[in-house]
Amino acid sequence: MANANSRFHYDVLIVGGGPAGATCARFSARHGLNVAVIERFAPYSAKRTSAGIFDHTWKILELSPSSYPHPMKSPNVATFKTLNNGKELTGMLSAVVSKLNRYVYFPNRDEFDGWLLSLAMLEGASVVHNTAIRPHDIDFKDGRYHVQVGNQVHTSEYLVGAAGTCCPVYRRYFGNSGSWPDTTMFLTEVEVLESEYSGPPYVSYFNFMNSGVFGWTYIEGDGWLHLGTAILSKQQKIKKADMLLDEFVLSLKSKGQLPENFKVENHPTLGGSIRMFAKHPMSSDDGSCFVIGDSAGLLQLDAYNGITNAILSGRLCADAISRGDRTGNIRNKLHRYLFTDVLHDMIGNAVPMLKRIKPLS
């Protein structure tokens, strides 16, 4: 690590200012900790993708949909259609969804991420914008983590990796089996004017044409619809054609949901990969270093829960750090919270002894 002209010292240093990192920063600051976020984008990330935010996600954030300053749609969860091999899922899933009677909100990711980070700053968190960190920029010595940012060094007692699928904290301290463990989700998405689309607004297509391929159509809150496809693979790279986006568009055309002259290349597109590290730990052995959100592989195959899991992991991480909890059982707490929260909504009134688990102790 090169010599630096200045040093900055914190209790908690978070690499990545997305939903997981911003939530961790906000609640760490609320606990009275001196916290900073290193974020590579300024001021917002370039992500005009959909974000499914459930009722219980707002509870975790201790916020409400009415506090959100940008437009978004909020259909009832029961209005979602989930197709598997062209057939709508029924039975137990439908019964559970009808009892939950929840709503899901679709803000744009660039606006939502920026808003969460601004809330963290209002709580007192510092943000270092427009800075990309690589694994060799991070070091641990004398009981503290040291992160090189240009000619500055930022140090902290706790280090949190929240920088997504290529998180340098994960690669520095958790990537014991190499840089490409387990399964990866490759995805591509197209942004379409809502006026060009005439199909159901919120649909997931599981096992579209091939096993492991799924598609989606989600209407955003500002007049746009996002449609896309994804595929799960254990390979490092795949061919774009394997994601069957063109075939998915053709199927929507055949149903009259898109005009015949619709061409993918004439619309804004984005793609990427999400490494699914679900079998890997979320904290170091001594509990001083954490990975949360996509860095920890918390994505679920149903596209609605990725953001919720990321936000909850950030909240639980902040709580653990504030309590000095170095047991590293965040993943277990996360799954237990999500299960009990759903169970409470289903039968909580009938069973008064069943209390909703709160992220804060």
Image: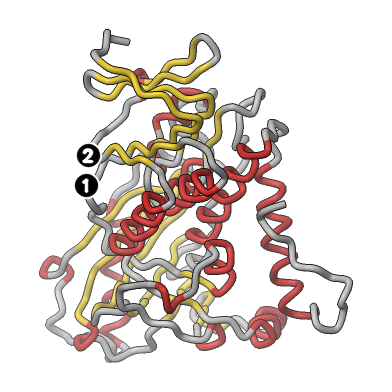
**In the rendered structure, are the residues bearing label 1 and label 2 in contact, judged by CB atoms less than 8 Å apart?**
yes
Q: Which quadrant of the figure has residue 130?
A: top left
Q: Residue at x 43, y 79 (%)?
A: 66
Horizontal side of residue 72 vs 84, given as left or right: left
Please tell me how many numbered marks the rendered image carries.
2
Instruction: Give the labeled residue for mark 2.
Output: 130
Q: Position of residue 326 (x, y in %)?
A: 69, 31
Instruction: Give the labeled residue for mark 1.
Output: 42
Q: Residue at x 69, y 86 (%)?
A: 99
Q: Which residue is drawn at 74% across and 61% down?
A: 357
Q: Where is residue 113 in the image (x, y as percent from the top left)?
A: 35, 57
Is residue 280 visible to the viewer in this orientation of the structure?
no
Residue type for callout 1: Ala
* Distance between mark 1 and mark 2 Cα atoms: 5 Å
Residue type for callout 2: Asn
Q: Residue at x 31, y 82 (%)?
A: 252
